[in-house]
Structure formats: structure tokens, C-alpha cells
Image (cartoon, grey):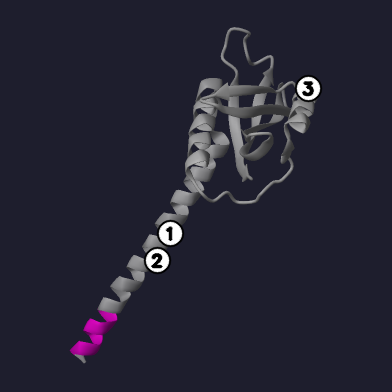
Amino acid sequence: MTKQRGFIFLFSIIFMGVISLLILTQFRHFYSYYKLLTHYQTREQVQYKVEKALRQLQQSSFFPPACTLYRGSANQAINLIKAHKGCIIEQKNMHYLYLVEDLPLTTNQNTTFQNRRLTIALMDGDHISKGIQIRYVEKLGSSIQPTEKRQFLMKSWRYFG
């Protein structure tokens, strides 16, 4: 009888440990998602994250094929740039396409949020080979002073290529 109680006690401790581990991992996932959706960031922080993502993009050998919208020749990239006021920046013998697109506005009380999509693509020779798409929200309206740094809310990251 005592062996059976010992076994039940040991099993219940293991079971509670597994349950608590599952709860903690889910909490960590939800907390990071909450932080991503609620934390406003300055342009410099966004640029740092973009540059970090680009470095990771260059170093990794696998790029999830999430979006093929910006594959194509350099002429298509230049046309996109002219249409959306983007730019090509040369850095260490590599060309990057920076493209900002305005998406529909959303209004919340006195503040207007401009939804934007930033595309950064690595141009390999004459073609756009791989890149990253970032959706973010720029806070506009009366609550932001002209001297204040504009703040951004990162919404999602999307790799393609």
C-alpha cells in the first residue's frame, strides 16, 4: 500500500511539474506578443531591429517563402521606389531596397494611426533575392509634438525570398 502511495505521489509531482512548465511557456509566448503589440518604439530602435534582422537574413541559409511580391529585376525595384518614395542604399558592395508603403488609416478617438509596411530587400546583382517586410503603425495627430520623436508600433515581421 505504501509503494502505491509513493508511486501516486511521485506521479502527481511529475504531472504538476509538466503542467506548470506548459503554463510558463505559454505565458512567455503571450507576454512577448503583448510586449510587441503595446510597446512603442522610436525610429532608431526600429532601424536597429531592421539592421539586426538584415544581418540575420544574410547569415542564415533558410528563408521562409512567406512573400514573393518583391522578387524581380532592378528595373521593377526602381519603379516601386519611384511609386512609393523608397530608396536603394549601397552598403559594403550590397544594395538594399528600402520601401515604405502607406496602408489604410485607422482612427482612435483624437489620435490617428498610419499603418505602414516597410520592405527591405537585399538585391543580389540585378535581382531582388531576399528581404524582410515589417508592418508597423505610426502614431499621427495632435498628441505628437513636432519636436517629439515619432514613435512606431511594430506589428509583424515577414521574411521572404
- Indicate which disc, 3 or 2, sits on the residue closer to the N terminus: 2
Residue flagged by tag 1: what amino acid is it?
A: Ile
Q: Looking at the image, which is closer to me, 144 or 104?
A: 104
Left or right of 69: which side holds 34? left
Bounds of the magenta segment: 2-9
**In the rendered structure, are the residues bearing label 3 and label 2 in contact, judged by CB atoms less than 8 Å apart?**
no
Asked whether 101 falls inside the magenta stretch, the response is no
Q: Name the residue under label 1.
A: 23
> Which quarter shows the N terminus?
bottom left
Residue 51 at least partly seen: yes
Q: How far apart are marks 1 and 3 (CA)?
A: 49 Å
Q: Looking at this rendering, what residue extends furthest in the top direction?
A: 147
- As drawn, the label of residue 19 is 2
- As drawn, the label of residue 140 is none
Identity of the residue drawn at 80% across and 24% down: 83
Q: Looking at the image, which is closer to me, 74 or 38?
A: 74
Q: How many other residues sit within 10 Å of disc 3, few (<14), some (14-19) or many (≥20)?
A: few
Residue 131, picture quadrant: top right
**In the rendered structure, are the residues bearing label 1 and label 2 in contact, judged by CB atoms less than 8 Å apart?**
yes
Identity of the residue drawn at 57% across and 38% down: 37
